[in-house]
Structure formats: C-alpha cells, structure tokens
Image (cartoon, rainbow, N blue to C red):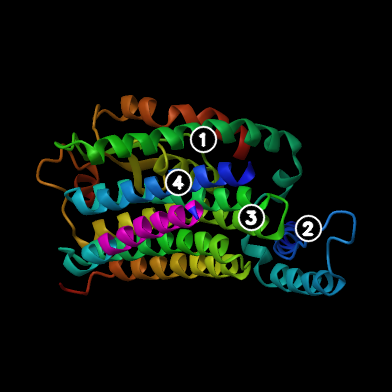
Amino acid sequence: MRKLVMFIVSFITWMLLVFRGKAGTCCFNLQDVIAGLFAAMLTALIFGETFTKNPHKFFDLRRYLWFLVYLPMFLYWCLLANLDVVYRVFHPKMPINPGIVKVKTTLKSKSGITALCNSITLTPGTLCVDLTDDGYIYIHWINVESQNVEEASRMIIQKFEKILTRIFE
Amino acid sequence: MNEIIGLIFIAVGVFFDLAGCIGLARLPDIYNRLQAATKSVTLGTCLILAGCAVFKGILSPMGIKALICGVFILLTSPTAAHALARGAHLFGVKLWDKSVCDMYEQDKKNF
Amino acid sequence: MSADIIYQVFFGVLLACCSICMYRISSGPTVPDRTVAIDIMGVVMVGFCAILSIVTGKDYYINIAIAWALLSFIGTLALAKFLEGKGFDE
C-alpha cells in the first residue's frame, strides 16, 4: 500500500517533468513513459517503506478540499509577512524586540507538525527553532508580545491548527 | 498581455529578494537574519518562477517545470531554516543583547 | 529595446543581492552566519537562472534551476548537521 502511494506520487512528478505541451497531438513521448514507469518502480521499491505511516489518508478526497481552502489563506499570510519584513528592514530604527518563546500544539502526526512548522516560518515575525516529543515548539519571535505559553499559542498557531487538523489528522 | 503580467510578477519578486538581502546585512544577530532572509527570499524567488511560468504560458513545458521548482523551494526553504536555527543554537551562538527572553536556553539546562 | 533595459535592471539588482551575500560570507562573525548567507545565495541564483531562461529563450536553464535548488538544499542540511556536532572552533 505504501509502495503504491509512493509509485503514484513519483510517477506523476516524472510525467510533469517530461510534459511536452502540444495541444491536439500526443502530449507524451512513449520512451519517456516507459522510462518513467521503471524509475518510479525503482523509487517505490527502495524508499516506499519510509514515505508515510498512514497511506489511507491519501485516498480521502475531503482532505484535498480542505487543502484548497488552506492555500489562499496561507498565501495571504505569506504576503503579509513579506510586507512586515520590508517595513522592519527599511525603517531607519529597526523596530525589533526579539526572543524565543514556547508554545504548545495539539497536532500529533509528524506530517501535520511539519506543515505547522513550515507555516509558522513563513508567516509574520516567527521562526520555528526546535520541538520536543510532548508537543512543545520553541519559536523565535521578532516582536515578543507575550511570554505566557497559552497566550503565545493563541496568538501564533491557533489560526492554523483547526484547518491543519482537518487536513492531516 | 501575458508578458506584461509576468514582468510585473518578476519585478515584485526581485524587490522582495533585495529586501531580504538588505535584511541579511542590517539585522543584528543570526536568528533575525534567518527570519528576514528566509521569508523574503523564498517568496521572492517563487514569484520570479511564477512570473516565468506566466510569461511562457502556464501549460508550456517550461511553465510546468518552473511551477514545480517553485513548489519545491516553498517546501524545502523553511526546512533548511529550521535546521540552521537549531544547529546555530546547539553550536552556541547567543541571542542579541537586547533580546527579551530565551526559554530554549533555560529548558536546555534542565535536560 | 525597452525590454532589454528592464532585464538589465533585474540582473543588476540580483547581482547586488549576491554581493551583499558575499559580504556576509566574508565578514560574518560566526560560522552559522556564513552558512545562512550561502543558503540564501543559492536561492537567489535559482531566480537568476529563471530570468536567464526568459532572456535567452533557451528552456534548459530551468533544468539548471531545479538541479541548483536540490543541491543547495542538501548542502545546507549537511552543513547544519555538521554545526550541531560542536567540535569546531572559530
């Protein structure tokens, strides 16, 4: 099962890489397709066991719909983060107030925590530094507003947690 | 028309790249530099690649390859930033003098 | 004609970014600073290759960009893992 998921993912990636977009005629070369089958099979045989723990999640269509909801929200926060960086960098006095704070997350799965950390890093003023086994994340915050664990959790990660729970848990 | 939209995307991306690199030069310690540089340069390069894709047409071979490269950078750049921040803290780099708090240092002593 | 000037401005700004990164590599106070600058310069060069593929009209520059992104990421991870080992003085 895991190997099947890995095979499908790597084969789709290969197909996008060798795409020859001529509408009407044949979009793919036959040689490319055969080589892609062999390459994807080899990848699935070697790395299939380490890819994911719960492969049935890949066949659940609601997760993809929630991901489509999550994408515009994430792009909006990302753009806001960049405007924030531009403001802080070009300001003559550099209004920064940095520190490392600790927050607690309720996500359990590893892919969910990875997605949460990537989202934290690309949103305004925060950078994920380390995480512990019992669900605490250390975050470098460029403008510390609260050192309390619950309050910082509410301010930083609550806006992602609900929707990431629906995608990854 | 496609070309003008693509050039606007590329111009915005180049501006964000410049902002990130100036942040790399001006900010005081490594964590702040890592923050400014990672955010700005990641989104800037993704905008440049998206502009290339729009310029050549999204369904052309080059457009799809540029979009794949953009998704790849968007996934891997924050991961490299985490690894660097953790490595720098374990290496022993202190925070800036005017920093407010460092809970990671306190908890590391209790381990 | 005017498009050429726009591309030259883009290349100039990206080269300025690379020189700032080179300044940080040469004068960074600690080793992690230099590593950060190397990582950032790799990502900037990916954007450089993408613009180059538009200017010259050759598609294979985007393949170079993909390969550069992969190698830059792996190199940064290796350097970060090396920094955690601590036995390396300034």
Q: What separation in Å lies between label 3 and label 2 (alpha carbons)?
A: 32 Å
Choose mark 3 or mark 2, whichever is in front: 2
Q: Which residues are magenta?
A: C2-20
Q: Is residue C78 left or right of residue A2?
A: left
The tag earlier along the polypeptide, 1 or 3, is 3
Using the numbered discs, state the Cα–Cα distance from disc 2 to disc 1 in whole angstroms. Answer: 30 Å
Please give the label number shown on residue B11: 4
Question: Which circle's residue, 2 or 1, is located before the other in the chain?
Answer: 2
Provide the secondary structure element on which disc 4 rests.
helix
Task: Give the prevailing secondary structure in the magenta stretch.
Answer: helix
Q: CA distance from mark 4 to mark 1?
A: 22 Å
Can you identify the residue that label 3 sits on?
Answer: A52
Mark 3: secondary structure = loop
Chain letter of the residue beneath label 1 in the structure image: A
Query: Few, some or many C-alpha atoms within 10 Å of disc 3 (few <14, some 14-19, many ≥20)?
Result: some
Q: Nearer the viewer, mark 2 or mark 1?
A: 2
Front one among A29 and A155: A29
Residue of label 2: A21
Chain ID, mark 4: B
Give the amino acid type for the residue marked by disc 1 in the picture. Phe
Q: Amino acid at mark 4?
A: Ala
* Residue extending farthest left: B97
User: Mark 2 and mark 4: span between their CA atoms?
Assistant: 27 Å
Which mark is nearer the camera, 4 or 1? 4
Name the residue carrying label 1. A74
